[in-house]
Amino acid sequence: MKKIYYLGVAFVIFSSFNAQKTRNENDFIPVEITRENGEVENVLMKGIYFPKTKRFQGMVAQSNTKHSIYSTDVVFEYKISSSDEVKKITFNEVKKIKVKDKYDDEIVGYEKLKILELDSKMNLVHKNYVAMLPILYEGKINIYGYDHYLCYNQNESSCSYNTTLLYLKKENDPYAIMPFDLDRVGILNFREVDDRFIAGFRQAGGKCSNFSQYLDQLYKKLDTEGFYATLRKGYPEYMKKMRETANNDNIKGKERKNFIVKAKHDFIMNYYINIIGEYEKNCPY
């Protein structure tokens, strides 16, 4: 069954745990841990919940090399109950984490992903980090990712939504991939965006010939119209409609800001989901 999650909504729900205090990654929060050995445990953990990532380096990741922005020895702290002593579990020991609400319902699930990227010669290689990423969409091809914000000081009001960073992985595949890889997008390789985007979906889609043919047609469209022009097609009209909805519903202040961010998030997500929809219609596995 297909499921779609939105982290901004999860943040609102999660904040209701304690109206006197905003939850953040330094709080011990209820989670379900699945260890690499298959053991499942319900604990209170800190350092995992981050529905709004203030910088690209903000995701929970562990580097495979010493020369990286990420640590090589990430450790989570947790308690069995609020009155118990703090224990530690390493990044390598954890496979999945489910964040729970006060009713023990899942808000959002995280999965540890090994990630592939395309190098300068468009060959698939391993990224130098492993990431614990929230799942945003469950289907034949899963979407993982988070909303990325740019901030200009320590005040949250200075933060503005930049984009939603997305990763793809078929359920039983060992690796995920970013079709739009910010690590590889720059002025010098700007023309490779189309190639990387399509190659990312080809990797996620495997050997399904019908999906491959669809991607061939999509590539021609991207090549003719341009990647960003295609991705943003209908975006101005869509956002105008969303702002009109906010005005008509008298949505103001922070609630309005969250509403607009969700609209932008949904626009990007829907583009990916529509492509995955072609896979789900035409590929039996």
Image (tube, rainbow, N blue to C red):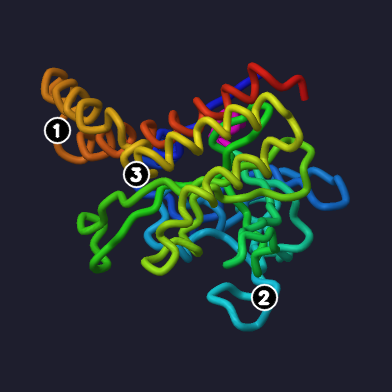
Question: In the structure shown, which secondary structural element does the residue marked by tag 2 occupy?
Answer: loop
Disc nearer the start of the sequence (3/2): 2
Tag 3 near tag 1, CB within 8 Å: no
Query: Could you tell me which residue is drawn at 46 percent across and 53 percent down?
Result: 193
- Give the number of the mark in front: 3 or 2: 3
Question: In the structure shown, which secondary structural element does the residue marked by tag 3 occupy?
Answer: helix
Query: Could you tell me which residue is drawn at 36 percent across and 66 percent down?
Result: 187
Count of marks placed on residues? 3
Disc nearer the start of the sequence (1/2): 2
Query: Could you tell me which residue is drawn at 61 percent across and 60 percent down?
Result: 122
Quarter occupied by residue 249: top left
Front one among 269 and 154: 269
Q: Is residue 102 magenta?
A: yes
Tag 1 near tag 2, CB within 8 Å: no
Amino acid at dot 1: Lys
Instruction: Say whether residue 254 is visible.
Output: yes
Find disc 2 in the rendering and name its residue: 72
Question: In the image, is residue 250 above or below residue 60?
Answer: above
Find disc 1 in the rendering and name its residue: 252
Question: In the image, is residue 36 above or below residue 126?
Answer: above
Label 1 Cα neighbours within 10 Å, binned few <14 / some 14-19 / many ≥20? few
Find disc 3 in the rendering and name its residue: 228
Quarter occupied by residue 9: top left
| Residue range corresponding to the magenta coloring | 100-108
Q: CA distance from mark 3 to mark 2?
A: 35 Å
Tell me where residue 205 appears, x and y as whole percent: 68, 35
Residue furthest out toward the right: 37
Amino acid at dot 3: Tyr
